[in-house]
Each structure stands twice: as C-alpha cells, then as structure tokens.
Amino acid sequence: MKEIVILSGKGGTGKTTILSSFAVLAERTVLVDCDVDAANLHLLLESEIEERFDFWSGQTASIDQDRCTDCGLCREYCRFEAIRNTTVDHFSCEGCGLCARLCPSGAISMRDNLAGEWYRSRTRFGALFHARLGIGEGNSGKLVALLRREAMDLAESEGVDYLLCDGPPGIGCPVISSLSGADLAVLVTEPSFSGLHDLERVNELCRHFKVPSMVCLNRSDLNEEIGERIEVFCREAGIDLAAKIPYDTTVASSLAQGIPVVEYAQCEAGREIRALWERIRSEQFIFAKREQ
C-alpha cells in the first residue's frame, strides 16, 4: 500500500478535483480528506456516513459559580483575557490550566473539550475518512493524524493498493501532519504569482521531510508567462513537472453534477489527469527511493 498526498500550498488550485479522479482510476483505495477545517471531498464523491465519532482535544476552564468568591485572581493572571466577570469565554481560553491552579477556593476545573467530529463514510470508490472541526477549535494537526492512522489501519487490513489523501492548503500544522511519512506528494499549482510562491514553500516542506514530490500545473494555459516561470523553478529545483492540465469548462460542469471529471466526459483535462495517474503508477523509482 502506497500513500499519496495531494498538496498545493494554497487553496483553490484543484486538489480535490484531481484527487476525486484519482479515486476513480485507483480502483482499490482508501481516501482521507485531511482538510478538517473545510472538508469537501465527501460532497464530490456522494459519500454516506457509516460511523460517526466525537473528537476530544484539549481542555477548557469552567467556573463553579457556587464556589467562586470573585477574588479576581483568575482575571488578573489570564494572559488570554478569557475570563470576564466570573465566566469563561470558551473561544479565548487556551486550556493552559493556570487559573485552576491559582484559584484559592477551588472553583475552577479543567474539562475535556469536544472539538469536533470525524467520520468513516462509504463511497463507490472505497472508504472515506473525513472530519469537521468545531468553530474556532485548534489541534487540527492532531485530528489529521487521527484520520490518517484510522485510514492506514483499514487500508492495511483490506490490502488496498493506495491510500489517497487530500491535503489542506498552506504549510502549517495540518499540512505537516498530512505529509509526514507519505510515500509521494503531488504538488498542484496554478500559473499565478501566489501559486508559484506557495509552490516554493510547500516544496521546501517536502524536502525537509524527505518526501518525494512531483508537480501538476493546473489551468496551465491561463497565464503562459508565469507558467514558464513555474517550469523554470521545477527544473532548477529538480522536481518533475509531471502534468500540465489546461483550463477546461467541462471540469466545472462535472463538479456541478458531483461526478469526477474522468467519469463525466471525454475532455482534455480528463485525459491529462489520466496521464498523470499513469505517470504516478509507473514511477516506481520514486517509491523505491522512499523505501530506502
């Protein structure tokens, strides 16, 4: 079983669109949507939730009004200004526990925090693990790690060929949690200044974690000048520019129907995505390098 993660460094480059087509082409796979702050792969693949679980992470202070003497110590020493009068602003509380240690009357306790939910769903392409983090909740990297661990266990038990992960945008904690330990990263970018800038950043992240990578230039014909700059960057950085997918209005139509583009119609974008997947399957030296 090989784990492939789709990253971009920024949102809106087409990661989910491309991964949904990979799910069609892989045949035997387990899927993970690592963008726990704004998951959308389950919408495109028409998934059905089979199991639902609470995600508990961190703690939040709680004040027992009957025991509180309103001495003000908690308000004075809270660096996050989370205590107002004798109540706790749960969005501001960072769960450090200092107020509970300082309270002379023992009125403050730390309670486990329900930070969101995660799901195991069924799609016609295989199992999908995804989640919904609560509003303002942190620890998204921990939730991503949980999803990947559960997906890996299922993938190994069922003997599937590929574990496909739709990574979150950016280069922060959830991206690191999505990337570390993967066999291959497919970096999806677009011909824009922000696309090039964020490609450079996410490439450095892959190099740091020693994860082999290749680049997919999506909507490649929208800005030829920046597209050429991306090609130059790939050559100088020693990254394989594995695919150049042209802008194709068929993709928008397929998304509106909730059908991966390689299933929806014969089009140029679909043919390029198929060619990219075949390239990934044939690049066994990349996986061999990772195994060494």
Image: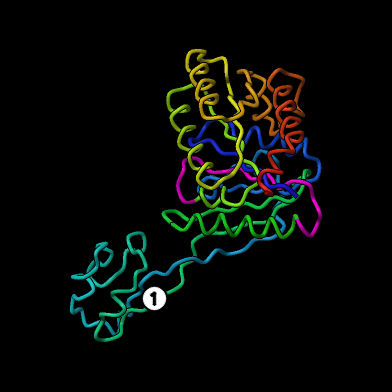
Mark 1 surroundings: few (<14), some (14-19) or many (≥20) residues within 10 A: some
> What secondary structure is marked by label 1?
strand
Figure coloring:
rainbow
What residue lies at 73% left-to-right and 32% top-to-bottom? 277
Numbered circles on residues, count: 1
Q: Residue at x 56, y 45 (%)?
A: 210
Question: Image quadrant of residue 238?
Answer: top right
The magenta stretch spans residue 157 = yes
At x 66%, y 46%, the residue is 290
Asked where in the image residue 267 lies, by quadrant, the reply is: top right
Q: Identify which residue, 60 or 207, lies in the foreground.
A: 207
Left or right: where 28 falls relative to 205: right
Between 126 and 67, the one lying in front of the other is 126
Q: Where is residue 146 drawn, in percent x and y?
A: 59, 60
Up-down relation of residue 129 to residue 237 (above or below): below
Percent x, y for residue 287? 70, 43
| Magenta-colored span | 156-173
Where residue 76 sits in the image (x, y, percent)? 18, 70
The residue drawn where x is 49% and y is 55% is 140
- The residue where tag 1 is placed is 110
Name the residue furthest front.
292
- Left or right: where 211 falls relative to 72: right
| Left or right of 290 in this view: 231 | left
166 vs 119: above or below: above
- Residue 280: horizontal and vertical position, in percent? 71, 34
Vertical side of 50 occupied by 167: above or below:
above
Whether 67 is among the magenta residues is no
Amino acid, disc 1: Met
